[in-house]
Amino acid sequence: MNDNGKLTQEEMDTLLGSNNGSKTEEPFHFSELTAKETKQLKEESVNLPLLLDIPLEVVVELGRTKKKISEVLEWTSGSIVDLDKMAGEPVDIYVNKKLVAKGEVVVIDEHFGVRLTEISPAPF
């Protein structure tokens, strides 16, 4: 970090996983940070709080299916749509349309939730 508290180009390239002119051989992945490194990064970076407040779309997918328009038009209240996953199979968790984890559905005080069981390697 330079004297005015801003990241250098090399630090930005490292954070973003860019190899353009940087010394690193492999892209950097935030999932590889240890808790100590994450804390240190937060303390050193003035602009990190700006990034931490960016909203992300999180989607939990129970399963998928394909239907013809005529089949969809026949749906009524109470219709059942079969999905390609079996009961108890892990659900997929997407962040901004990228698969980042798998998990199991849980119920918490009458609300659905997901317990993460597997994080995808280097999802970002």
Image (cartoon, helix red, strand yellow):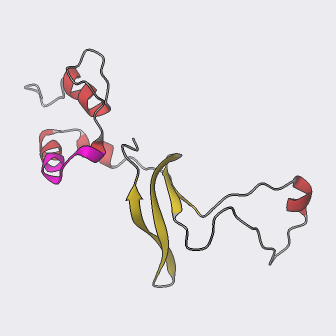
Magenta span: chief secondary structure:
helix
In this picture, residue 87 sits left or right of residue 70: left
- In the depicted view, which residue is nearer to us: 3 or 75? 75
In this picture, residue 53 sits left or right of residue 38: right
Up/down of 6 relative to 67, above or below = above
In the displayed orientation, state which residue is furthest to the bottom. Answer: 109
Indicate the quadrant where residue 44 lies: top left
Residue at 34 percent of width and 49 percent of height: 53
Residue at 15 percent of width and 50 percent of height: 39
Residue 1, x across and y down, in percent: 12, 29
Residue at 17 percent of width and 39 percent of height: 45
Residue 78, x across and y down, in percent: 80, 78
Magenta residues, as a range?
31-39
Question: Does the stretch in magenta take in 70?
Answer: no
Indicate the quadrant where residue 11 lies: top left
In the displayed orientation, state which residue is furthest to the left. Answer: 3
Question: Does the stretch in magenta take in 35?
Answer: yes
